[in-house]
Image (tube, helix red, strand yellow):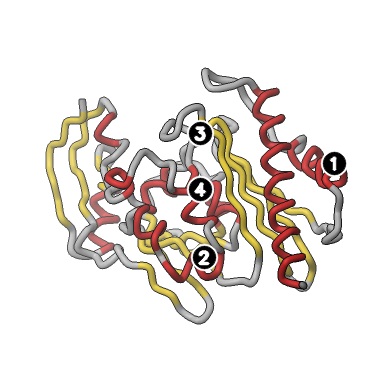
Amino acid sequence: MLTIGNYVKVKTLEEAYELNQARNSRIMGGMMWMRLGNARVKTIIDMSDLGLNEIEETDHVFRIGAMCTLRQLEEHEGLRKFYGDGIAESLRHIVGVQFRNQATVGGSIYGRYGFSDVLTALLALDTFVELYNGGTVRLSEFVNRKADKDILVSVIVRKSKRKFRYESIRQTKTDFPVLTCSVVTGIYRGQESWFFSVGARPMKAALLEKQWEIPKDATDEQLTEYAKRVAAEFTYGSNMRGSAEYRQHLAEVLLRREMRSILDEYNAEEK
């Protein structure tokens, strides 16, 4: 059972940061996972009055406030326009609409959960996190940092004309994933690059970049070899949902499927 001593609805980020430095203080997001824990929290910090519940779209980025819900992310038309159905696909299996209406983006990213669909999806994109004390850092760097008492303010996704795909495997529709995969490709720093993110390994998601120029008419056999090479570079573990060997096999299948889907889209655009 979660026991809370004090509840504070802060007025500034500075106040939230100072309160959070206490050992037994916690930031309150959607409270979807925290409330299931067994802990005593001296002070729970509510940031819902700080205007962090919006997705701001500029000419260059999407700035996603930490208090935005997963449902807001799922339904955002700007993200859909740039990245197709990939973002929504990464969210639609997370429990149900009621849950996604409460769970926050900040909580999902800051927690760096091994099972996080959100982390796997955003990691493959050109994504940064804005921290109150630590500044703006790449998500790929943040995900490997040790947990601290900083505050995640927003998630920033740079706009780019790249193709994005997301898939996951679950034993049942709303269960935690057995494996999650994202693939992004396009021109990055002047060169064609492929980004592969694999999560629920069952460890947290990891990112791999390959500067490959895969022909648009690549055969399934060629893509299978590419997928095997990528999947072999990730580390996998075993738990009640699957063995390490099974997860690596799933990664090969999902990555090949996503690469094929992207190449098919390129070919359709050229016709």
Single out the mark in the foreground, 1 or 4.
1
Give the amino acid at mark 3: Pro
Give the amino acid at mark 4: Leu
Q: Which mark is residue 225?
A: 1
Single out the mark in the foreground, 2 or 3.
3
88 vs 188, left or right, is: left
Which quadrant, please, contains the C terminus?
Answer: bottom right
Specify whether residue 27 is in view. Answer: no
Looking at this view, name the residue that lies furthest to the bottom.
Answer: 59
Percent across and percent down for residue 220 are 82, 45
Quadrant of the rendered image containing residue 246: top right
Specify whether residue 128 is in view. Answer: yes
> Real-space Cα distance between discs 2 and 4?
12 Å
Percent across and percent down for residue 153 are 37, 61
> Real-space Cα distance between discs 2 and 3?
24 Å
Tell me the residue that label 4 is attached to.
119
Percent across and percent down for residue 207 are 65, 48
In this view, the residue in front, 249 or 237, is: 249
Q: Which mark is residue 157?
A: 2
Give the amino acid at mark 2: Val
Mark with earlier residue (3, 1): 3
Which quadrant, please, contains the N terminus?
Answer: top left
97 vs 12, left or right, is: right
Tell me the residue that label 3 is attached to.
177
Single out the mark in the foreground, 4 or 3.
3
16 vs 207, left or right, is: left
> Real-space Cα distance between discs 4 and 3?
13 Å
Mark with earlier residue (2, 1): 2
Quadrant of the rendered image containing residue 16: bottom left
Circle 2 packing at 10 Å, graded few (<14), some (14-19), many (20+), is: many
